[in-house]
Every structure is written in C-alpha cells, then in structure tokens.
C-alpha cells in the first residue's frame, strides 16, 4: 500500500483520519525524527499534497473595552485596593467562548439604565405587551 510506504519513509504512524477531509491524517513521529525531517519527507513524495505541523495555539480573548480595567469583577488585579483574583474569571472564560447571537439574557430589573451606551443598542422591550394589565396576552 502506497500510504504505508509514505509513512514508513517519514518513520511515522497514522494516529487519526478525518471523516470530512478525505485522505487527511494526523501522524505520530518517533522521538528520533524531528517535525522538520518528517515534513521534508512527506513533501518530497509525489502522492502527498501537503504536510504541515500540528500547531498548538493558546488563545487569549481580552476585550477592547476601554473601561475593562475599571471593571474589577471581570479581572481583579488588585486595582482599586481590591483582592487580586477575587473576580468572576471572565478572561479565562473568554478563551473558551465569547458568546453568540443565539443567546438571550433577560434581566428583570426596574433599575436598568436602558439608555446607557453599553446597553442601549441591545435592549429589547416587548412593545406588544405593554398595556400594563399584568397578563402576557400578546401571543
């Protein structure tokens, strides 16, 4: 089998194939073969379209909000004489997800300043049910 020959040339073994990308494989290299050597071996074979390292990246999603540093509850570094680390761990959470358009958060609070510049564009009010009869009767 040609695939086995290609892997043997790079002294590697197949770890994983990918259902949605035909003929794509993740390979394992022995300690005696460098990533650069394996890539050179694969790229020199006429049956190999491309070979790339399995890059590992660490994402850090820190917001561009100019008021971020004053929001100690998101990331408390001791600013404002606070206790470093006494926060909601927002920055590590943002490395996992920053949300989506499919999530709706409802705040039942009459004290929300819906005109505030951080909220105004995202506020929604059920105008169809604002007759103040105490019933959800707008369908």
Image (tube, rainbow, N blue to C red):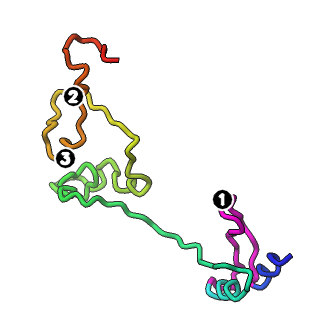
Asked whether residue 34 is drawn in magenta, I would say yes
Say how many tags the image has.
Answer: 3
Residue at position x 22%, y 52% from top? 72
Instruction: Say which quarter of the image contains residue 113.
Output: top left
Q: Label 2, on which residue? A: 109
Q: Position of residue 90 (x, y in %)?
A: 34, 51
Callout 3: SS? loop
Question: Which quadrant is the N terminus positioned in?
Answer: bottom right
* Element at label 2: loop
Binning the other alpha carbons within 10 Å of mark 1 as few (below 14), some (14 to 19) or many (20 upward) gives few
| 18 sits to left or right of 68 | right
Gap in angstroms between the C-alphas marked 3 and 2: 16 Å
The numbered mark, 3 or 1, whose residue comes first in the sequence reads: 1
Horizontally, is 15 left or right of 58 in the view?
right
- State the image coordinates of residue 43 (x, y, percent, origin top left): 67, 85
- Does the magenta segment cover residue 116? no
Foreground disc of the pair 1, 2: 1
Q: Is residue 68 left or right of residue 52?
A: left
Q: Is 89 in front, or is 121?
A: 121
Distance in Å between CA atoms under marks 1 and 2: 47 Å
Q: Quick one: which residue is furthest to the right in this view?
A: 1
Residue identifier under label 1: 20
Quadrant location of residue 44? bottom right
Where is residue 100 shown, x and y percent of the image? 39, 47
Secondary structure beneath disc 1? loop
In magenta, the rendered stretch is: 10-35
Above or below, 15 against 66 in this view is below
Counting residues from the start of the chain, the first of labels 3 and 2 encountered is 2
- Residue located beneath label 3 in the image: 118
First in sequence, mark 1 or 2: give its number. Answer: 1
Quadrant hosting residue 33? bottom right
């Amino acid at each position: 089998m040609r695939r086995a020959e290609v892997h043997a040339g790079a002294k590697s073994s197949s770890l994983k194939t990918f259902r949605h990308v035909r003929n794509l494989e993740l390979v394992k290299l022995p300690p005696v073969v460098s990533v650069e050597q394996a890539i050179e071996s694969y790229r020199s074979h006429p049956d190999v379209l491309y070979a790339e390292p399995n890059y590992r990246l660490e994402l850090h999603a820190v917001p561009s909000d100019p008021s971020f540093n004053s929001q100690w509850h998101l990331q408390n570094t001791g600013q404002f004489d606070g206790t470093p680390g006494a926060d909601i761990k927002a920055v590590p959470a943002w490395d996992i997800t920053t949300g989506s358009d499919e999530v709706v958060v409802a705040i039942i609070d009459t004290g929300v300043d819906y005109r505030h510049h951080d909220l105004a564009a995202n506020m929604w009010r059920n105008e169809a049910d604002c007759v103040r009869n105490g019933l959800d009767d707008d369908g």
